[in-house]
């Protein structure tokens, strides 16, 4: 904002082009089961070109409906992919925890465990296997937070391939084909006119 360059103007034009091309998209909600919850967690490791911080992406479904999502830059730079993925898992588990407490106050009880899908094998092993903790002391707070939820049986961390990772849309620019596929998975329907652009 203090020293705009031509590059920044090009990015603003891309954002406006994206908004114009997605004006007809609408989120659709479905009747049905509201007692099951599923979540997806992803990260764009060191994706910010200025700070090299990673971006966490998370989305949570109640039944077939998307009820919560986030795309958030992590607070610190990480030196390992597993660390960034594990931080993203912790963010998603915190969101699940909050949603469960809100639903419980409304008299809605969720079937446990909540399935949380992650596309990083190291992070999924770390959540289920406390023996790995000796090699990952820098993750201690996140480790205990996620592992307690797994231990209590409230959350089940499962591996998913990057190809099927729905939270991918919150962490990086995508080609229009994958973007359209993921928006459909997020219960967002309509016609996009952003073919051929990334972002």
Image (cartoon, rainbow, N blue to C red):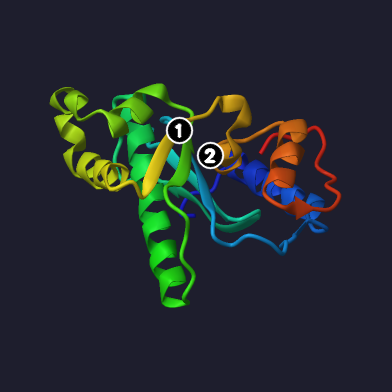
Alpha-carbon distance for marks 2 and 1? 19 Å
Please state if 180 lies on the left or on the right of 86 as rendered.
right
Instruction: Write down the residue under mark 2.
Output: 171
Point 46% across, 42% down: residue: 116
Circle nearer the N terminus (2, 1): 1
Residue 49 or residue 121, whichever sits in front = 121
Element at label 2: loop
Point 62% across, 26% down: residue: 163
Point 61% across, 55% down: residue: 63
Instruction: Write down the residue under mark 1.
Output: 158
User: With respect to residue 100, does 128 lie above or below?
Assistant: above
User: With respect to residue 119, does 63 lie above or below?
Assistant: below
Q: Residues within 10 Å of mark 1 (few under 14, many from 20)?
A: some
Residue 186 or residue 127, whichever sits in front = 127
Task: Give residue 14's position: percent from left, percent from top.
Answer: 70, 44
Task: Give residue 155's position: percent from left, percent from top.
Answer: 38, 46
Disc 2 or disc 1, which is closer to the eye? 1
User: With respect to residue 150, does 32 lie above or below?
Assistant: below
Q: Residues within 10 Å of mark 2 (few under 14, many from 20)?
A: many
User: Is residue 130 at least partly visible in the picture?
Assistant: yes
Answer with the quarter of the image where residue 24 lies: bottom right
Point 17% across, 28% down: residue: 133
């Amino acid at each position: 904002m203090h020293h705009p360059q031509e590059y920044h103007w090009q990015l603003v034009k891309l954002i406006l082009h994206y908004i114009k091309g997605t004006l007809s998209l609408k989120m659709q909600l479905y009747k049905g089961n509201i007692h099951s919850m599923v979540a997806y967690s992803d990260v764009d490791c060191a994706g910010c070109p200025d700070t090299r911080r990673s971006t966490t992406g998370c989305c949570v479904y109640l039944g077939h409906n998307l009820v919560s999502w986030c795309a958030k830059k992590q607070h610190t730079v990480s030196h390992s992919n597993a660390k960034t993925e594990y931080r993203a898992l912790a963010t998603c588990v915190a969101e699940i925890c909050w949603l469960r407490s809100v639903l419980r106050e409304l008299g809605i009880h969720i079937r446990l465990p909540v399935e949380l899908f992650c596309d990083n094998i190291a992070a999924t092993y770390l959540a289920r296997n406390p023996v790995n903790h000796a090699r990952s002391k820098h993750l201690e707070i996140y480790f205990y937070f996620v592992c307690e939820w797994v231990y209590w049986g409230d959350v089940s961390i499962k591996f998913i391939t990057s190809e099927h990772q729905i939270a991918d849309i919150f962490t990086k620019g995508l080609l229009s084909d994958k973007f359209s596929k993921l928006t459909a998975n997020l219960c967002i329907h309509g016609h996009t006119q952003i073919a051929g652009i990334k972002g």
